[in-house]
Image: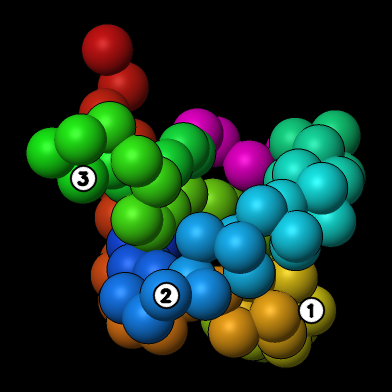
């Protein structure tokens, strides 16, 4: 499988945290589906200096770039405009 490191920063407007929290249950539901299918490796929230969520990182794996695109087309944090800056990089989890 092809592995990817996704780093995504939320918007910095005054409604950013409210958007995140309102979409979060849908994001977690999709993440659980990814985990059940073997596509989710790890992930979590990126925090600011005060410990507040300001973004996310995920390591995902798919059989093709098309599957990655399909995930991005349906990711609640993307659809809900929570993530404002998204970076996707090829990645390889260390076999340790």
Q: Which of marks 1 and 3 is nearer the N terminus?
A: 3
Disc 2 designates what residue? 14
From which residue to which does the magenta span run?
38-42
Q: Which of marks 2 and 3 is nearer the N terminus?
A: 2
- Name the side, left or right, on which 40 lies relative to 75: left
Q: In the image, which disc is placed on residue 64?
A: none
Q: Would you say the residues marked 1 and 3 are in contact, meaning their CB atoms lie under 8 Å apart?
A: no
Q: Is residue 18 above or below residue 87?
A: above
Q: Is residue 67 visible?
A: no
Whole-number angstrom distance, CA of label 2 to CA of label 3: 15 Å
- Name the side, left or right, on which 5 lies relative to 73: left
Q: Where is residue 78 in the image (x, y as percent from the top left)?
A: 62, 80
Disc 1 designates what residue? 74
Q: Residue furthest top?
A: 96
Q: Report crowding for label 1: few under 14, some 14 to 19, many 20 or more residues within 10 A (C-alpha).
A: few
Q: In which quarter of the image is residue 76?
A: bottom right
Q: In the image, which disc is placed on residue 48?
A: 3
């Amino acid at each position: 499988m092809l592995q990817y490191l996704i780093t995504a920063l939320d918007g910095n407007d005054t409604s950013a945290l409210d958007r995140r929290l309102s979409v979060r249950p849908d994001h977690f539901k999709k993440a659980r589906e990814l985990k059940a299918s073997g596509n989710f490796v790890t992930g979590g929230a990126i925090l600011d200096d005060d410990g507040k969520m300001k973004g996310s990182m995920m390591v995902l794996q798919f059989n093709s770039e098309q599957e990655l695109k399909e995930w991005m087309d349906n990711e609640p944090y993307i659809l809900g405009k929570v993530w404002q800056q998204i970076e996707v990089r090829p990645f390889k989890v260390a076999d340790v």
